[in-house]
């Protein structure tokens, strides 16, 4: 069993707003015992999660393989980062990014 916690910063572009994507991400995070957050931005969806390397890899794969039917994912960028020490997973408020829109 892996005990080393790592982090991932994930950005998803495409039709991922208004299609139940954040609740879908929340469910995946619970399934893989991940902690962190998901939010809509004017440039897509941002996610930061902590977990074991195996769980993080499975989570990233499931984001596209199991996406909601109305979602259209154009691009997923996932970068490894240090674990943030999150203890729960949350859907957080949306954030506008200047000059970005979908």
Image (tube, rainbow, N blue to C red):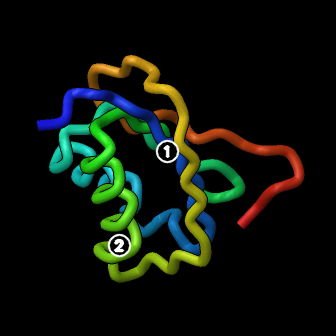
Drawn side of residue 41 relative to residue 88, left or right: right
The relative height of residue 62 versus residue 45 in the rendered view (above or below) is below
Indicate the position of residue 52 as horizontal and vertical percent values: 28, 38
Could you say which quadrant of the image residue 33 lies in?
Answer: top left
Callout 2 secondary element: loop
The residue identified by callout 1 is 47
The residue identified by callout 2 is 67
User: 6 or 23: nearer the eye?
Assistant: 6
Q: Earlier in the sequence, mark 1 or mark 2?
A: 1
| Residue at the extreme right of the image, as rendered | 99
Could you say which quadrant of the image residue 85 lies in?
Answer: top left
Residue shown at 39% from the left, 59% from the top? 60
Residue shown at 62% from the left, 58% from the top? 44
Indicate the position of residue 14 as horizontal and vertical percent values: 60, 73
The relative height of residue 95 versus residue 5 in the rendered view (above or below) is below
Q: Are marks 1 and 2 in contact (CB under 8 Å)?
A: no
Whole-angstrom CA distance, mark 1 to mark 2, is 15 Å
């Amino acid at each position: 069993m892996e005990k080393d916690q790592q982090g991932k910063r994930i950005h998803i572009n495409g039709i991922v707003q208004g299609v139940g994507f954040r609740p879908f991400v929340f469910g995946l995070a619970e399934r893989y015992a991940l902690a962190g957050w998901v939010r809509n931005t004017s440039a897509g969806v941002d996610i930061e999660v902590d977990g074991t390397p195996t769980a993080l890899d499975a989570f990233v794969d499931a984001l596209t393989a199991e996406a909601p039917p109305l979602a259209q994912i154009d691009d997923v960028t996932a970068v490894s980062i240090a674990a943030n020490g999150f203890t729960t997973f949350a859907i957080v408020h949306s954030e506008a990014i200047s000059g970005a829109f979908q």
